[in-house]
Image (cartoon, rainbow, N blue to C red):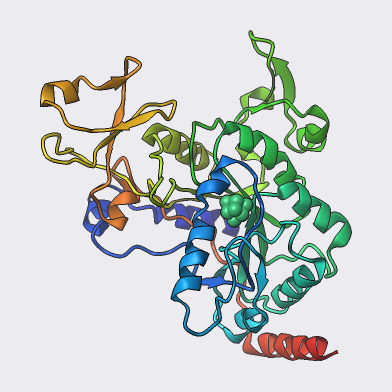
Amino acid sequence: MSDFNELMDSLSRTMRGEEARKAVEKPLPRPFRFKWHPIIGCRMKTGPVCNDCIARKESWEEFQNSTSGFWAAKPNEVTVHELQLTEPIRYREPMDIEVAPLSDLFQPDVSDEVRHKIFTVIKNAPQHRFFIQTKNPAFMKHYFKTRVAVEWPLPNVWVGTSVEDQASFNARVPNLLGTNAHNHFLVFEPLLGPINLEMIQLDTFDRLWPFKQMVQAYESMDDEGQRHWAPLHGEPLMRTPAIKWIYVGGMRGGNARPPHPDWVQRIVSQAAENLVPVWFAGFGEYSQLEKPDLENDETLVYVNKRGEYRGRGVGSITNLLAQTLDGETSAILSRKTSPARRMLLNGKHYLEKPPMPVKFSNTQIKDSVEALALRLKA
Ligand code: SF4
């Protein structure tokens, strides 16, 4: 019951209406207090989305701006930062920590030895929550089943996968849910298409079998002969306790494609219906405006529900107002905006996190640090 109350408390912190409007020019909270970089760089290619990888871009910028030699690595190579390895243990105050945000811990170029060191540190910093996301949940599942070298699962670890469209959702989510862990989360970033959380297209039947049992879903066939999983008795799949947090965001960077607001709203609404906290990180480089400046804002883009988009270009207002893609009225977004405004979805901010669990005493943390020091020396 207390979990439920805490969750409701977290959900009620969602800002709405006037409150959200006042906050648009203020800096907003971040989902993680600390970004931990025991490794940086990534050599994986999981699809076209890797071509515009913001982690690679940011690690390259860090590398170029670095004067300390700390970032002495190339973004498409994996570099281990031994000095950063024990960093979380120095902080006694509980924090949410993003693990290796400029890399992917479950890419083949990271050795099990490095992963073991990272999980040893995590085990010895129980005051923090560690959020690990991967685009390779199949390997993550295998790693925790057969190769992990610490006592597993650890209650302070959150495992997640990032998906960008229905195909990647269908392929990765079953592996995420099949991963032995206490806490699972989903990252919809960069969101590049509509995603139906309640129905997974069944193109890899065998791999999905354990997932099928987990969510008590059943198989069905649609009119075009496509096999689907649908929830039993109309219950949404997300009602399973498996997913405890959802993070949604648009693409960032020079090539950013705008997500349609309806795609985001659909995910956010499904999360809310199922009492799953949701964090909306924004439309990437774009924002919704209450009254777009159709005459002067050259940064406006039109996006339809299939993700086709085009810029405002030059033209009369009459042409502009008539602008539709394939006859469908498009959403209008603008690049001329502030970071807080980008995080508004239909006038609201969604900044929900799962509530922090128990607090640890200083003695517990001290014992843990000493145990780790001994282990690393051995
Ligand atoms: S960090 Fe993620 S998005 Fe970037 S290249 Fe690696 S797998 Fe692709």
Of all residues shown, which one is farthest toward the right? 146
Which quadrant would the N terminus be assigned to in this image?
A: bottom right
Which quadrant would the C terminus be assigned to in this image?
A: bottom right
Work out whether residue 276 can be spotted: no
What is the total number of numbered labels drawn onto the structure image? 0
**Residue 88 located left or right of residue 312:** right
Q: Picture coordinates of residue 98 (x, y %)?
A: 57, 66
User: Hey, which quadrant is residue 128 in on the image?
Assistant: bottom right
User: Hey, which quadrant is residue 132 in on the image?
Assistant: bottom right
- Indicate whether 114 appears above or below 205: below
Q: Residue at x 44, y 75 (%)?
A: 65
Q: Residue at x 60, y 86 (%)?
A: 90
Q: Residue at x 64, y 64 (%)?
A: 77
Q: Residue at x 66, y 46 (%)?
A: 241
**Residue 181 located left or right of residue 233:** right
Q: Picture coordinates of residue 276 (x, y %)?
A: 54, 47
- Indicate whether 310 appears above or below 358: above
Q: Picture coordinates of residue 155 (x, y %)?
A: 71, 65
Question: In the image shown, does 136 or 265 lie closer to the viewer?
Answer: 136
Question: In the image shown, does 220 or 276 lie closer to the viewer?
Answer: 220
**Residue 364 located left or right of residue 14:** right
Q: Picture coordinates of residue 320 (x, y %)?
A: 18, 25
Question: In the image shown, does 91 or 213 lie closer to the viewer?
Answer: 91
Question: In the image shown, does 111 or 132 lie closer to the viewer?
Answer: 111
Work out whether residue 363 can be spotted: yes
- Indicate whether 196 appears above or below 143: above
